[in-house]
Image (cartoon, helix red, strand yellow):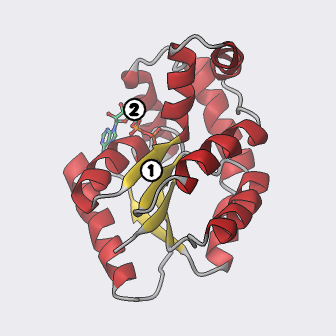
Amino acid sequence: MRERVLVLGPPGAGKGTQCKLLAVARGLLHLSTGDLLRAEVAAETTLGQQVKAVLDRGDLVSDHLVLAIVRNRLALHRKGWLLDGFPRNSTQAATLDDLLADLGQPLQVALQLQVPQEELVARLLGRGRSDDSEAVVRKRLQIYVQQTEPINAHYQARGLLKCVDGLGSVQEVATRIANSLDECQRGEGTIC
Ligand code: ADP
């Protein structure tokens, strides 16, 4: 089965953690735009230097750049995939619709991982990445609420949004996600 899944949710919700497990368990490509951008920074390319300045401020990288990365990866890929960290705003969501239509790879489900704000801050400050200072964490959460959360409605309107409780152990959340995807494969209704 070629599953095509978006994993949505605020920074710190556990998208990266869960996608890594899911990709192995279900034989899917895990496409994390954050990881791809950080790889560009690590490679110290000119593009990477520009990306680093944006990430260090806690801002979003341009829609054009992120879309180019996603298009290249999906166009080469013939199995199912998990998109992690994309789309981040309504422009990216609309462009992704067009891109997937173009590639003949329609989305099957958008999983929304739900975690309360206080837990997100605690998790992100515990993660210790260079772009995870408290001020930057709060800015990223604010940008999420302003720009990214509204796209849930975009997927809900298409009957594609499925909410999953992201609180609990990594294994508990993984089991909930697996159950949700199995429900989708059986064609059971989306719930949010
Ligand atoms: P995201 O990709 O959504 O930003 P990550 O997967 O990077 O989130 O997780 C953010 C932080 O929270 C990491 O430090 C990770 O170890 C931790 N984390 C992930 N899932 C859980 C969980 N179920 N319970 C507690 N901490 C978690």
Disc 1 on helix, strand or loop?
loop
Dot 2 falls on a residue whose secondary structure is helix
In the image, what residue occupies the spot 64% across and 22% down? Answer: 55
Q: Position of residue 114 (x, y in %)?
A: 46, 56
Which residue is more in the foreground, 99 or 33? 99
Q: Which residue is mark 1?
A: 115
Residue drawn at (55%, 45%), measured in percent from left and top? Answer: 85
Percent across and percent down for residue 86 are: 60, 49
Q: Quadrant of ligand 1?
A: top left
Kindly indicate whether the residue at mark 1 contacts the one at mark 2 (C-beta within 8 angstroms): yes
Q: As displayed, is residue 88 above or below residue 126?
A: below
Q: CA distance from mark 2 to mark 1?
A: 10 Å
Q: Amino acid at mark 1?
A: Val
Q: Earlier in the sequence, mark 2 or mark 1?
A: 1
Residue at 35%, 72% (x, y): give it: 181
**Quadrant the N terminus occupies:** bottom left
In the picture, measured across the screen, residue 6 lies left or right of residue 57, that is: left
Residue 77 image offset from top left, x and y in percent = 47, 56
